Amino acid sequence: MLEQIRAVNPEAGARFLEHLVLQKRRTVSSWRLLSRIQSDVRSQDPSLHTELALTYIDEVLSFLSDDATSKLWRAKGMGLS
């Protein structure tokens, strides 16, 4: 399911991966199917935590490569000196 979501929309795939790794199992009946998928994925593929960490690293590197963000961080660094 995760790969299908990623194929359609990579950002949605990243957010779903985040949900699978970080969200606790829901007890509300409308969330039972998602919870079952979530627990199945966790038990079948422990590398999802690593995959999520790598996704976050890619996002940070993407932000840092953005000129506006880079200038903002440099300005913040100058203010701390």
Image (cartoon, rainbow, N blue to C red):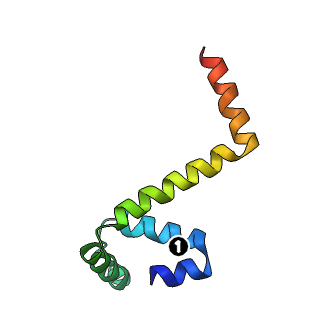
Quarter occupied by the C terminus: top right
Residue 25: quarter of image: bottom left
Q: Which residue is mark 1?
A: 13
Foreground residue, 26 or 51?
Answer: 51
> Which x, y percent locates residue 7?
58, 81
Residue drawn at 59 percent across, 18 percent down = 80
Residue 6: quarter of image: bottom right
Q: Residue reaching furthest left? A: 43
Give the amino acid at mark 1: Gly
Residue 77 lies left or right of residue 5; in this view the side is right
Residue drawn at 26 percent across, 78 percent down = 44
Residue 19 lies left or right of residue 62; in this view the side is left
Residue drawn at 29 percent across, 72 percent down = 42
> Which x, y percent locates residue 46?
28, 68
Q: Is residue 44 visible?
A: yes
User: Vertical placement of 1 versus 19: above or below?
Assistant: below
User: Vertical placement of 40 versus 55: above or below?
Assistant: below
Residue drawn at 68 percent across, 46 percent down = 65
Foreground residue, 2 or 26?
Answer: 2
